[in-house]
Amino acid sequence: MPYLFEMHSISVSYDTGFALRDVNFRVNKNDFIGVIGPNGGGKTTLLKVILGLIRPVSGEIVFNSGLIDGNGIGYLPQISTGDISYPVSVTDIVLSGMMIRKKIISRMSSSDKKRAAEVIDELGLTGMAQSSLNELSGGQLQRVFLGRAIIGNPKLLLLDEPGNFVDSNFESDFYEKLRDLNKHMAILMVSHDIGMISSHVKSFACVNRGLHYHPSSEITNEQLMAYGCPIQLITHGEVPHTVLKTHS
């Protein structure tokens, strides 16, 4: 299967110590990988290495031909309330994704604006193109930033805790949209909610400074502990509950 990138013995160090250590990882075309692990384990650092925002202290990342270009990678970072305070419209935010992939700053073309309108419609935001961000619900806001990430038709989509701003009314639609996108792009999705994403991803990468790849969407508490990912496995059903480690 054609790969998009490979990491070879990647290590990243901050003043407090190693964030990632000796990571080997490969992402193939149309993968849908859930990136899980404890807080501070290096999940966001992993994404930033892929984006080229952080340079590893050792190792290398090898990209397949064509990935690192204008249409290569889409990125949906964690969203905070500060991101909605600017007086910009839905269209402005979605169009800003085109600016990221352009080699030079230029005026948006009519084809760019047409593409933005198509993305806005695809994400169920018809009629909100000129709305300000502070007029939107959490789910609508997440769709806007997803639109910014996918407007350039990337080959690889990186999502950092996308569920944080997804409201319950849009949650199923959001993950269904990701399933559709995965037909023509690979997706890496950082999330703390294993129970929710396990029904959508195809495999898991457990990150806790090191990385262990689990080639299935089915994962147990025992496997998480074996992989060095001491996190709770949360399940969803009629009565929300958490599966806890057996008491002695």
Image: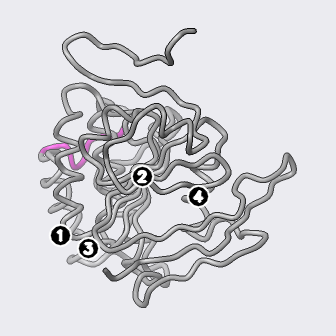
Q: Residues within 10 Å of mark 1 (few under 14, many from 20)?
A: few
Q: CA distance from mark 4 to mark 3?
A: 31 Å
Residue at the far right: name it: 15
Span shown in magenta? 127-133
Q: Is residue 218 left or right of residue 80?
A: left
Are the residues tagged 2 and 3 within 8 Å (C-beta)?
A: no
Q: Horizontal and vertical percent for residue 99? A: 43, 71
For image coordinates 68% across by 50% down, the residue present is: 209
First of labels 2, 3 by sequence position: 3
Are the residues tagged 1 and 3 within 8 Å (C-beta)?
A: yes
Q: Horizontal and vertical percent for residue 20? A: 69, 56
Are the residues tagged 4 and 1 within 8 Å (C-beta)?
A: no
Q: Horizontal and vertical percent for residue 28? A: 36, 73
Q: Is residue 114 left or right of residue 133?
A: left
Task: Check disc 2 and report its element: helix, strand or loop.
Answer: strand
For image coordinates 31% across by 80% down, the residue present is: 1
Task: Check disc 4 and report its element: helix, strand or loop.
Answer: helix
Magenta stretch, overall SS: loop
